[in-house]
Amino acid sequence: MKAEDLMAKAVQAAESARALLDRGDADGSCNRACYAMFDAARAALLAAGHDVGKTRRGVLNAFNDHLVKGGPMPKEAGRLLKHAEAFRHVADYSDNAVELTDARAMVEPAETFVTAVRTAFMPGAP
């Protein structure tokens, strides 16, 4: 998959996260917010010429190793990506539901993350 295609998926997932949040679906919005960030991270890695890894952990590690540590992305971006993965795990696999306030605290940074990655790695993308 090309970086542009992954970025398009990331943008769509961020839009879906916002729509689900607006409908009150905290678990669904956290899931989509996490995937928005995950796909944006994969797009950034590809755009920067790095391997995206074969696992979720591989993507998280590659993003931090290549794009955060001494790279163009701030440390907060790496922390946020790991935080999103933890929330997705609760939303998708836990017996406990994510609170709407927690979902909001995930969706808004995910939108910012996707925008920041697009600006840094694909400034000409729509």
Image (tube, grey):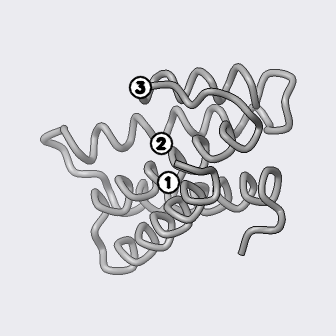
* Residue drawn at (61%, 27%) of the image: 51
Compute the Cα span from label 3 to label 2: 16 Å
Which element carries disc 2, helix, strand or loop?
Answer: helix
Give me the residue at 42% from left, 67% from top.
17
Q: Left or right? Give the position of 27 relative to 83.
A: left
For the residue pair 80 and 13, the one nearer the viewer reads as: 13
Q: Earlier in the sequence, mark 1 or mark 2?
A: 2
Kind of element beneath mark 1:
helix
Whether residue 12 is situated above or below residue 103 in the rendered picture = below
Where residue 10 appears, as percent x and y from the top left, is: 53, 59
Q: Is residue 100 left or right of residue 65?
A: left
Q: Nearer the viewer, mark 3 or mark 2?
A: 3
Give the quadrant of residue 101: bottom left
Q: CA distance from mark 3 to mark 1?
A: 22 Å
The residue lying at 82 percent from left, 68 percent from top is: 124
Residue 92 placed where, x, y %? 23, 45
From this view, report whether residue 83 is shown above or below residue 116. Answer: above
Check disc 2 and give the amino acid type.
Ala
Report x, y in % for residue 45.
Answer: 67, 37
Under mark 3, the amino acid is: Thr
Q: Are marks 3 and 1 in contact (CB under 8 Å)?
A: no
Disc 2 designates what residue? Answer: 84
Disc 3 secondary structure class: loop
Please tell me the numbered disc located at residue 106. Answer: 1
* Residue where numbered disc 3 is placed: 55
Q: Residues within 10 Å of mark 1 (few under 14, many from 20)?
A: many
Report the mark closest to the observer, 3 or 1: 3
Q: Are marks 1 and 2 in contact (CB under 8 Å)?
A: yes
